[in-house]
Image: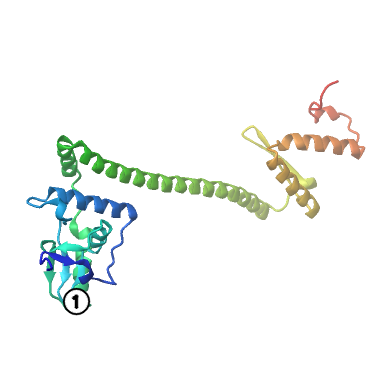
Amino acid sequence: MSDPERISVQDLCCLDYNPRKISKKRFNRLQASIKEHTKALDGWDPSKGYRFAETITVNRNGNRIVGGHRRIEALVALGQDWVHSDDITWVKLDPDSAEEKALCISLNDEEASGRWDEDKKNDLLKSIQADTDELYEKLSLYALRKKVKEAAENSSKELEDSLEDARERKKQFVDNTSFVVQEILEKYGDTIKNGFMLFTYKNRTHLIVQCDDDTYALTKMVGELLKRDNAEVNKFLSVAFRLGIENSGWESEEPDEYLPEDPGNED
């Protein structure tokens, strides 16, 4: 003989358009919540089976589950294939009607259930801790994990934004430097004599050199090698210029006036 209090899960129909999803962690937590409620239910022997804290909603026309899909799934995962009749709220709507769909959305809408009052929630957690540390620990760990996850996501986004901002500033600085030089040349013409120019800014000397295609290719190659070996361009240019002077056969009345000490090793 069938038990009228037990409604078989197989007699209930899940809606294909149910919009709610659930993560594995939340699904495990839902199962734990069903277990806890079953133990606490007044006048109910937990050995008889699991019960819900809130009723599921089922449309009599087709026994269609309008609200409570995940609780049914959790119940089956716990090894139970029936729902207590007291844990079902019955409605009567046309299947697939706008009313049925609207009810499904409202029953599954987290916003419709309201937000936490943090002060009251913390007071509740404190009172739970006073009664049972085990249950408080479960709730606190969940809240802590959620806060850590949110903080990590926010920090990660802020860090990425900062890095992107720094990259953009660096790019903009280089672009602006090139832009300024280009503006000067366009306004005053190409006044660089002998293909190079030296200028000093804030006690630092800068060199601008006009390059033909071959020189540009060599400069680009040397630049990549210097970056690769983390070498200083000034040391390279010093050696290169000395070799150039020696091989050119140039003679200067006062060569030491321009040349720094030879960086080579002394004997």
Residue 236 to residue 7: above or below: above
Quarter occupied by residue 76: bottom left
How far from the left and from the top, in percent, is residue 253? 89, 30
Q: Nearer the viewer, residue 239 or 62?
A: 62
Q: Nearer the viewer, residue 34 or 261?
A: 34
How far from the left and from the top, in percent, is residue 206? 68, 39
Residue 110 to residue 240: above or below: below
Quadrant, the N terminus: bottom left
Q: Which residue is painted at 13% across and 75% down in the image?
A: 92
Q: Which residue is painted at 81% across and 37% down in the image?
A: 241
Residue 244 to residue 21: above or below: above
Name the residue tied to disc 1.
62
Q: Amino acid at mark 1?
A: Gly
Q: Nearer the viewer, residue 76 or 19?
A: 76
Q: Which residue is painted at 24% across and 64% down in the image?
A: 69
Quarter occupied by residue 226: top right
